[in-house]
Amino acid sequence: MILLFDVGNTTVGFGLSDGTKIIDSFKLNTEVQKTADEYWIQMRSLIPVEKIESIAISSVVPRITEKLREIAIKHFKIEPLIVGPGVKTGLNVKTDHPREVGADLICDAVAVDDDHMPTLVVDLGTAIKYIYVKHKTILGVIITPGVAISIKALVGNTALLPDIDIEIPKKVLGTNTIACMQSGVTYGVAAQVDGLIERIRDEVKEDFNVILTGGLSETIAPLCKHPLKRDPDLVLKGLLQIYHRNVK
């Protein structure tokens, strides 16, 4: 069994694969102050430790990467595959500075089955990433603040606005402070997704599929007007493909 890690700035996602598909997945909070042993205590009750044969890591938080590598070596006696320079991905990255492209974006793009049509991946994480993929090539990316960042900025820079839970209000036009804020960070993000789909389509002058992934995709997907698919395990699926390219 393969243990796959998707380390983001808000959550540490990890999944189990039988080598062909993701069979289960879990999430922990990203807390850089935690020790490797504390992470190990949290995760060992969730996974069949004795069945893990290989480990692969996609991470945008280097301090967590090191803790997971420590866990892999100490508790599994495995040197993990870590997505980064020198790792085979099968992906072309047509950006000005390809080495700057995060491991999560790479995995998202690798997971796209775009043999017949280009695909726009919308990854609703700590930051919202729009990744345009065609023929296994990243042709462009958009990055905007994610919902949690927007709420933190709003609350931190205003005296009277409270912290809120991310829920979909009954109406777009709110009639109390919390509903107004919730509308802004749910319907507002959905409108951003719809609007950027239109602008990207105008620029590339071709049709494409849209896939939503990331922690808030379940909340935002029903609010979007454009046809799209949702795949919450896209990074893990891409990571699994990268693993197979590099490990015989």
Image: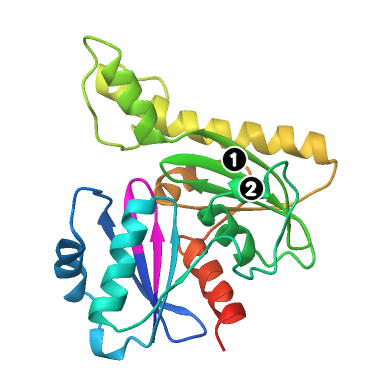
Q: 106 or 168: which is nearer to us?
A: 106
Write the start and end of the magenta stretch as one range: 4-13
Q: Which residue is mark 1?
A: 225
Q: Which mark is residue 131?
A: 2
Q: Residue at x 65, y 34 (%)?
A: 196
Residue 6 part of the magenta segment? yes
| Residue 132 located within the stretch drawn in magenta | no
The foreground one among 127 and 191 is 127
Q: Is residue 234 in view from this perspective?
A: yes
In the rendering, at what x and y percent does residue 189 appear?
A: 49, 33
Q: CA distance from mark 2 to mark 1?
A: 19 Å
Q: Quadrant of the C terminus?
A: bottom right
Density class for disc 2 (Cα within 10 Å; few <14, some 14-19, many ≥20) is: many
- Answer yes or no: do the residues labelled 2 and 1 have beta carbons within 8 Å? no
**Element at badge 1?**
loop
Question: What amino acid is labelled 1 in the image?
Answer: Lys
Say what amino acid the circle numbered 2 marks.
Ile
**Residue found at x 40% / y 34%:** 147
Q: Where residue 163 sits: x, y (%)? A: 22, 26
Above or below — where is 220 with respect to 56?
above
Residue 160 falls in image quadrant: top left
- Of mark 2 and mark 1, the one earlier in the sequence is 2
Q: Along the horizontal axis of the image, is 63 left or right of 75? A: right
Q: Position of residue 91 (x, y in %)?
A: 70, 63
Q: Which of the numbered marks, if any, corresponds to residue 72?
A: none
